[in-house]
Image: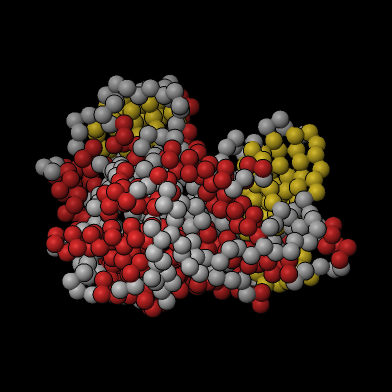
Amino acid sequence: MTVHAPSPVDAGIDDAAVRAAVAEANVPTLLMVLVHLTGDLAWLEPPYQPTRTKGMADHDDGGLPSEVQVTVRSAAAEAIVAWRRGRPMALPNPDPELLVRMLGVSMGEQVPSEYGEVLLEELSAGIGTSPPPSRVQVPTGFSAVIIGAGISGVAAAVKLQELGIPFVVLERAPAPGGVWRDNRYPGAGVDTPSHLYSYSFATKDWTQYFAMRDEIVEYVESVVDARGLDAHIRYGCEVELAEFDAEDCRWSVRVRDTTGSVEVLRPNVVLSCVGAFNPPVIPQVPGLDSFEGPLFHTADWPDDLDINDKSVIVVGSGASAMQVVPAIAESVAKLTIIQRSPQWVQPFEKLHKPVPDALRVLFQAVPVYRAWYRLRLSWIFHDKLYQALQREPGWSDERTINAVNEMHRAYFTDYIRSEIGDRPDLLEKVVPSYPPFGKRMLQDNGWFKTLTRDNVELVTAGVAEVRPDGVVTADGVHHAGDVVVFATGFDVVRFVSTFRVLGRDGRDLRQEWDDDDCRAYLGLTIHGFPNFFTVYGPNTQTGHGGSFIYTAEAQLNYIASLITAMVEQNLAAVEVRQDVYREYAETVDRMHEGMVWTHPAMTTYYRNSRGRVVAISPFRNVDFWRMTRAADLSEYIVVPQADSAAANTLGLSSTASHQ
């Protein structure tokens, strides 16, 4: 497929604007643009080869001498201007082998050949050469229900819309956005780059390299509007029960709206997109109801809260605390942080930094630049760290797991020292005793420098009691406060916990999982629960890095292949075989035994009450992409439609009542 030049007047961008943008652009990315636009592979050779990209940095200058950078920028500007004026792209469709070479050069390191196919798919989506989605011939009455209108729910709606499957999205809130809609606390934002924390099918003119909460919600809303999804979303609808009927292979989904009206929908397929970071958790310590001031979880931050010159207690030191604390420290009179355990944190060089206006032009006007910038981020934030997270057999230092991890520990510790300065009292409190990456790795947004402020106190004894005027910690010390904020995370080990699910033969999903021992084949389908899929389900979070949107889209591609098979082969139900389901879970557990997240030196929300890792995937992103390319029906129990009349009765019929 030919990549045509855009209109000369697209977005009002002229040649001068393009040249100004190139002057600020990422040099390794520009080199890849030059290869595409000119077809000249000399741009992959010395003297143009960037040095190795370190850590999570963009490495904007590529480590190249200034005169080489000038040459690259000048050539890139000329090539982009010529392309915009109509000159065809010389190399629009590089083969997988060349793409691997290109990524390797842009990163200054070796990239395994197995990444070629996924790079091709990602690049094609980014520059618009992917084939259009194939629609299916849907039997009369066939339909689906999506539960949740967060990021994964919206992606699921787009996928079903592209397939031509009738669907409805049930959302208990009055608007889309999921966890980003709910979490309005100061400093809320992503710690994954904005251009990576994006749908593959919907670009955005991001204003910051790491978007804040409002811009993310705006992005989700824009996709809903652009795709006309509001016509399919029913807001203010709380799902109470989903029950499978084996006689006609339909689900009964009981929904209650804000008026108390109860309705039962009857779809063929149910997609649970309720997410993992839901519901919020506040530890049940004595005296919670006795506090006389505002006391709440970060997910329930009051819109009208005034913290100016107040004494604020923040319980927790994880991801949300690390965002809240620097955001409010200058406004409050006193800030007390109750830390259960310290976190490993890495530099966050572009936090709160805007994407320069000139550079935003390039992201809009040159899709191949945007696509390659994202591809580089995918490598930096996805599988690059995977090998360093393997526990070396016989390794004796409990603070690390292998030689590379030991170097990471030294690097992060030195970074912490540089941030806290002459505060040895803090160093002892904030350097973890467990290996780096053992818990969720956080990005530093001013956390350590905030801890050195005169009005900030870090307490390492847990909360034992809440009193009317503050909290008492386990060491018996009373800490006075006007406001108590629980930055204590979410119930992430009890997937699908906001509604009841009854599968084949009346199986209760909560009992099937023995409450928190959740598992699912590919994180999305469970034996005994036909036609029921959990997007971003058990063992799908990417602990070694990456965007969960990438994982959700991989799962949705797989689900789409299953639904297509159901429709084309006239199947009433598909249910993963018990042996496939069991063997997958055993593989996940076995792989985790050799990785950092099962290390005994720490506790983590990745593990359930039994110590089993239920949240994190042990697979590389490229492995998961390959496993979810298409469903293999030999792994499923399939139930054909009994006859055409039965097929015509399947659908989104409903009954309504008031209870």
- Whether residue 508 sits left or right of residue 305 in the image: it is right
Residue lying at the far right in this picture: please name it. Answer: 645
At 64% from the left and 36% from the top, the residue drawn is 236
| Above/below status of 591 relative to 156 | below
Residue 393 pos. (x, y %):
31, 75
Closer to us: 392 or 327: 327
**Which quarter shows the C terminus?**
top right
Closer to us: 306 or 468: 306
| Above/below status of 349 relative to 520 | above
Residue 356 pos. (x, y %):
29, 45
At 75% from the left and 71% from the top, the residue drawn is 569
Closer to us: 330 or 381: 381
Residue 149 pos. (x, y %):
58, 45
Closer to us: 268 or 227: 227
The quarter of the displayed image where residue 455 is located? top left
At 85% from the left and 68% from the top, the residue drawn is 642
At 17% from the left and 43% from the top, the residue drawn is 420
Residue lying at the far left in this picture: please name it. Answer: 422
| Above/below status of 567 relative to 514 | below
- Count of numbered badges drawn on the protein: 0
Q: Is residue 251 visible?
A: no
Q: Is residue 162 visible?
A: yes
